[in-house]
Each structure stands twice: as structure tokens, then as C-alpha cells.
Image (tube, rainbow, N blue to C red):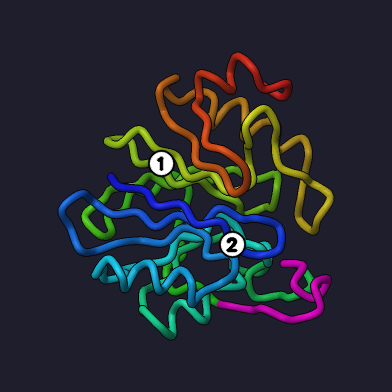
Amino acid sequence: MEITILTVGPVCTNCYIINREGSNSCLVVDPGDDGEKIASQIQKRGFNCEGILLTHGHFDHITGVSELLSLVGGKVYACEQEKELLMDPQLNASTMMGYEVALEPEILLRDGQVFEAAGMTFRVIHTPGHTKGSCCYYAEEDKALFCGDTIFMESVGRTDFPTGNGRELLDSVRNKILTLPDDVKIYPGHGPETSVGYEAANNPYA
């Protein structure tokens, strides 16, 4: 798996362009803003965008979706519990930023579901807490976890936005993420990449 990281939007969201080495198909994880910038990277590398994977529905992870779709296409994936938040500008906090974003994902995923896209296989891990429909995309073969804002290097996501829940977040971190193999790399929604082993030893919320 090849992973290109772009930092987008006003709160420096990590957007990931991922592809199987040697393939011209790609996926985008959390195009939080700057759809044109993301599309430019895809087009420059001659990729065909097969899909957009959303870890959750907050404005800083979805604002670039519409523009990106208009430029490169693809289907939008999200956890089934996140549909309401994605479609409600109040819940996804875009109104707080002075604009409104609402979108309906084409493919709703359930906890534990395994799916293949762009030649890569992922397992959906529903990790409620940051939002009720937050999820991680686990590429077991590549030892990679795209986790949105559930866990960061030495920290975890906030729970004071709509549908957030602190108890659920800690349960998700401890029982769904840190139980994965130590050498799994964690690609969060903000900040540097880390690993399960490092967080198990160093994260104060572990």
C-alpha cells in the first residue's frame, strides 16, 4: 500500500490518498477541505479514484467531498451509524464554521464488515465516542489503520461535539484499537502517524 498524506483545511486535517503499489486505482480517506488540491494530486499521478472513505462526519473531514467528487468521481463510504450526522449541518458542525455541508453516503458500512476497493481489503471497526458513527478502516494485510479522530499520538479525540461520548471513546480506544497487533501503524485525522504498540505504552488514555 502506498500512502500520500495531504494536510487540508483550517484545522490541519490529514487526508490520505491510498493505492495498491503498481495500480492506478486509489481511495481517498477524509477529504476535509481543498478538494481541488486533492484532485490535482490524483490526476498528476494518473490515478482513478474509486472511492472516498469517511471515518466520521465532522466538517473538517467532509468539506472537500463534493468538490472532489465533481473532479474525480468515486463512491462515498461511511459507517451506517453516521448517516444522520453527515446529513445534518448542525450535527456535523459546519454551521459553526459559517457554512452548511450535508451529504448522503452511497455505501453504508457495518461494524466488522470486510470490503474490497481499489484492490485493497479493509475491515470496518465501529469506534463510537468522538461521534456515534466514527469508524476505523483496518487494512490487515498492510498493517495500517485509518482511525479519524478516535485516537492520536499520545491523545484521543474530543467528545464535546454532538453525539460524542467519553465512556464510549475510551472503550473504543482500549478494546477495539489497542487490541490490534503492536506493529499496526495508526494514521489519525490530525497530527503524526503512530502505532498500536507505541500508544499502548505511551497514551495516557490507554
The answer to which of 147 and 1 lies nearer the viewer is: 1
Q: Residue furthest left?
A: 22
Depicted 54 relative to depicted 86: above or below: above
Residue extent of the magenta highlight = 92-103
Task: Tell me if 174 is positioned left or right of 27 in this view.
Answer: right
The amino acid type of the residue labelled 1 equals Tyr
Q: Which residue occupies 64% across, 79% down?
A: 102
- From this view, report whether residue 92 is shown above or below residue 22: below
Judging by the rendered image, the residue that carries numbered circle 2 is 8
Q: Nearer the viewer, residue 111 or 11?
A: 11
Nearer the camera: disc 2 or disc 1: 2
- Determine whether 9 is above or below 205 in the image: below
Residue appearing at x 52%, y 65% in the figure: 31
Prevailing secondary structure class for the magenta stretch in the rendered image = loop
Amino acid tagged 2: Val
Can you identify the residue that label 1 sits on? Answer: 138
Q: Is residue 73 left or right of residue 168?
A: left
Sequence order check: which comes first, mark 2 or mark 1? 2
Quadrant (top left/top right/bottom left/bottom right) for the C terminus? top right
Residue at image position (54%, 25%) is: 178
Residue at x 67% of width, y 52% of height: 132
Q: Which type of secondary structure does the marked residue at label 1 adopt?
A: strand
Local SS, label 2: strand
Disc 1 crowd rating (10 Å Cα; few below 14, some 14-19, many 20+) is many
Q: Is residue 82 left or right of residue 46?
A: right
Estimate the x, y position of residue 100 in percent, counting from the top left: 72, 81
The answer to whether residue 133 is magenta is no
Image marks 2 and 1: residues in contact by CB distance under 8 Å: no
The location of residue 137, given as percent across then percent down, is: 44, 47
Q: Which mark is residue 68?
A: none
Q: Is residue 100 magenta?
A: yes
